[in-house]
Image (cartoon, grey):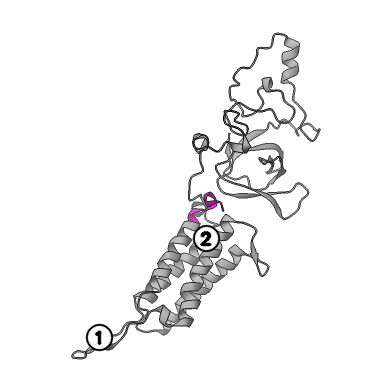
Amino acid sequence: MNIRSLTRGDGVVIGAAVVLFIASFLDYSSYDCPQGVDCSRFDSANAWDSLGLLMSVYLAGVIGAALLIVSRTMPGRKVVGLDLGQFGAALTVFALWTAFWTILDISNAGAGLILGLLATIALAAGAIAGPLVPFLKAPLVSPAGPAQAVQGGQPPYGAQPGQGYGFPGGQQQAPYGAQPSQGYGYPGAPQQGQPAQADPAQAQQAQAPQPSQGGADPAGDFTPFWFAVPVARPLYGEDGSPNPIAELAPGTWYLAVEQRGQSLIAQTQDGRRGVLQDTTGIQRG
C-alpha cells in the first residue's frame, strides 16, 4: 500500500468519512419539550437505532470512502466488474441522495442528520471532483526529494550504499552499454574519478551515442533522463495491453529511455520497460 499516492481529494474524502461516522452517534431528530412535562423519560435516538438510516447513509458513505482510498493505494482492484474507485464513488452519491431526502422528510431533524448531510456533500464532492480539479489532484504528501531518499536508508533501484544507481547525482552504473568513464547517468552530475582522455580519437569515440539494450539507437536526439512522478501512475506494456505491468511510485527516480509522442518509455528497478502515458507534472532529474 502506497500512502504517497493519496491526493488532496482523498484527504477531503477521509475527513468527511470521519465526520460522517461521528454524526451517526448524534441525535438524528429533535423535539420540543412542553412546559411542565418531564422529558427525561424520552430517549434520544441516533442512526444506530435505525438500521435503514444507518446502512443507507452513514455506513454507505464510510464504506464508499474506504473503497476510494483502497483503489487509490492499490490500483487495479475490482468488484463485480467495476473498479473499486467507481464503486466507492457510487456509494458516496447514494449516501448523499438518501440523506437529502431523509432530512426533507423529517421536520425536526437533529444534529446527527444535519451534520451527516453536510458530511455526505463533502464526501461526494471529494469523490467526484478529486480526479478532475487540479488543486485536489495534487499529492497529499509531498514526494520525497533525493536527500530524503538517501536519509531513509533505501538506495533507489536496489543499489548498495555508495553505488547510487538510479539516484541522480550518485556514482552512476552505466546502463545501455555505456562505459563508466563516459559519464552516463544523471544529466549534469559530476563523475568522480573519471580519467582524462589523452587521445582525441578516444574522446570522440567515448562521446558517440551508445546503442540501447534493444540494439537500436534512441529515436531522434532524445537523451535518457531521470524523473519522478507526483502521484502513483500505472506503467503499461509496450505491446499496448490495457492492463498495467507496474506502478511508478512518488519519491523514487525512474529512467526515461525513449519518447513516443506525449508518452515516455520508462524502466523500472527490476529492468522492466513500459509506457508511461500520463507525464503531466513529472519532476525531471
Examine the rendered structure and indicate whether residue 202 appears above or below residue 2.
above
Q: Position of residue 111 (x, y in %)?
A: 34, 75
Q: Position of residue 187 (x, y in %)?
A: 61, 28
Q: Position of residue 67 (x, y in %)?
A: 56, 64
Secondary element under disc 1, as helix, strand or loop, is helix
Residue 33 visible? The answer is no
Examine the rendered structure and indicate whether residue 201 appears above or below residue 232.
above
| Mark 2 vs 1, N-terminal side | 1
Which residue occupies the foreground of this view, 138 or 165? 165
At label 2, the amino acid type is Ala
Count the marks: how many? 2
Residue 242 visible? The answer is yes
The residue shown at (62%, 45%) is 279
Identify the residue under disc 1.
Answer: 40
Number of the label disc, if any, that sits on residue 265: none
- Asked which quadrant contains residue 257, the reply is top right
Please give left or right for residue 274 compared with residue 16 in the image: right
Q: How far is mark 2 from mark 1, CA to CA?
A: 45 Å
Please give left or right for residue 265 compared with residue 282 in the image: right
Q: Position of residue 11 (x, y in %)?
A: 47, 57
Quadrant where the image shows the C terminus: top right
Secondary element under disc 2, as helix, strand or loop, is helix
Per the image, is 4 magenta? Answer: yes
How would you rate the neighbour count of disc 2 (Cα within 10 Å): few for under 14, some for 14-19, many for 20 or more? Answer: some
Number of the label disc, if any, that sits on residue 129: 2
* Magenta-drawn segment: 1-9
Examine the rendered structure and indicate whether residue 123 appears above or below residue 154.
below
- Asked which quadrant contains residue 183, the reply is top right
Per the image, is 156 magenta? Answer: no
At label 1, the amino acid type is Ser
